[in-house]
Image (tube, rainbow, N blue to C red):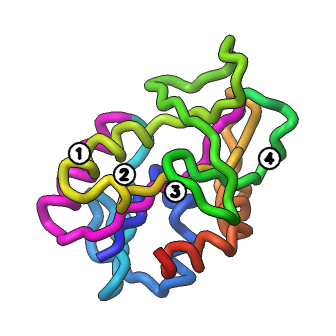
Amino acid sequence: MILIHTALLCEAQSFIEYYKLKKINSSPKIYANDDILICISGIGKLNTLNALEYIYVNYEITKAFNIGIAGCNDTSIDIGMLFCTNQSFAEIKTLPLITSDTVVTDSNIKKTTLYDMEAKYFHHVSQQYIKEEDILIFKIVSDHLSSEILQKDVIKNMISKQKNLHSLIKRI
């Protein structure tokens, strides 16, 4: 079974609709069909660790995707751009990612970098259960290290526009 992990429902919504998934669990929030399972953990370390431990103990996962939004310290990177942070694909650019336990609003790192609050923990748990090459982290640039909370529909639309993610999930 393929796992798609997100922190927020609005990050998962387009996948739930596209794959016609049904809600099968409330805590953690899980939507699934016969092939794909989406886990919406909530933001941050503890939510991510707890939700993913539940998933891996109760389901046989063969591939795991972490998909969500991330801040970027480079204002020349367009809002809405998609990056894979841990593998290379011809059609998707790659950038490094730093996972922080708090919202990052300032960075003294000179190299273009993405910032989120879950990916490191997603990777840590996933690598205990599946092969490294079956763990993929995709981030969409949502801001340039702003503390502003984005509207849920803005986040959903950013992710919905990433049509190549659907084909990539099926192809890999």
Q: Amino acid at mark 2?
A: Ser
Q: Is residue 136 above or below residue 35?
A: above
Q: Is residue 90 left or right of residue 57?
A: right
Q: Residue at x 70, y 50 (%)?
A: 151
Q: Amino acid at mark 1?
A: Asn
Q: Which class describes the residues within 10 Å of circle 4: few (<14), some (14-19), or many (20+)?
A: some
Q: Residue at x 48, y 35 (%)?
A: 117
Q: Secondary structure at mark 1?
A: helix
Q: In which quadrant of the rendered image does the N terminus lie?
A: bottom left
**Magenta segment range?**
45-72
Mark carried by residue 69: none
Q: CA distance from mark 4 to mark 3?
A: 16 Å
- The residue identified by callout 1 is 50
- The residue identified by callout 2 is 41
Q: Earlier in the sequence, mark 1 or mark 2?
A: 2
Q: CA distance from mark 3 to mark 1?
A: 17 Å
